[in-house]
Amino acid sequence: AARPELFFKSLPGKAVGPLDPIGVRTDSTWSVPEPELALVLNSRGAVVGYTIGNDVSARDIEGDNLLYLPQAKIYDGSCALGPWIRVGVDEATARTWTVSLTIERAEQAVVRGTTRIERIRRGFEELAGWLFEAQRFPGGAVLLTGTGIVPPDDFTLEAGDRVWIEISSLGALVNPVVRVGRRGPERPGTC
């Protein structure tokens, strides 16, 4: 399409870092991680760095009605970023990197996948330009570029899983999975 699919993902308080738990909604039956290259943008919309992003999504809620997209995408622990920001790299170099996903359950890999950043169709400056078209981000923004790895349709994340997202030259973003609902995260051994 002429216009890219851009949507709001997370307030800073809903995003988590490395080793922090990511959430799957208690009212969802089909949740998946979406491993993505994240563009770190300054207040003028220029790409100043790269990190790893995980756009955790409740696919069943999203599929019920497109107007439910915010509920499927924006909740506690639905976005993970890190482990650090790599600066001083141009887009051509970043496009040579690979992305891999491993999901562990009971210490066994149950999902694996790999793709290349070069498969992203739009240029990074173009994506940033669309994001900044009619809005300002005085503190900058982080733009997740979309996933190229999707777990099988019969797979859903479960509490206790561990998600590993690796991007060459950026390291690994590792997060355990917990269920989140009206009372916050459900952690083993808590009420």
Image (cartoon, rainbow, N blue to C red):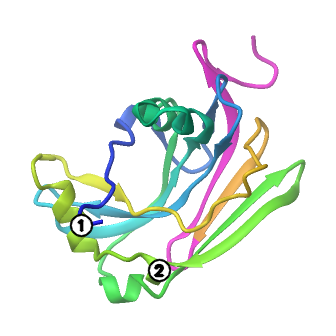
Residue that appears at 88% across and 53% down: 107
Q: Element under label 2?
A: helix
- Amino acid on which the number 2 mark rests in the picture: Arg
Which quarter of the figure has residue 131? bottom left
Disc on res. 2:
1
Residue that appears at 80% across and 25% down: 188
- Mark 1 touching mark 2, by CB under 8 A? no
Q: Element under label 1?
A: loop
What secondary structure characterizes most of the magenta part?
strand
1 or 2: tag closer to the N-terminus: 1
Q: Quadrant of the N terminus?
A: bottom left
Q: Quadrant of the C terminus?
A: top right
| Figure check: 103 above or below 10 | below
Which quarter of the figure has residue 112? bottom right
- Amino acid on which the number 1 mark rests in the picture: Ala
Residue to which mark 2 is pinned: 119
Q: Is residue 181 magenta?
A: yes
Residue 46 picture location, percent across and down: 17, 67
39 or 4, which is in the foreground?
A: 4
Q: Which residues are magenta?
A: 167-191
Q: How many marks?
A: 2
Side of 39 relative to 164 (left or right): left
Side of 1 relative to 173 (left or right): left
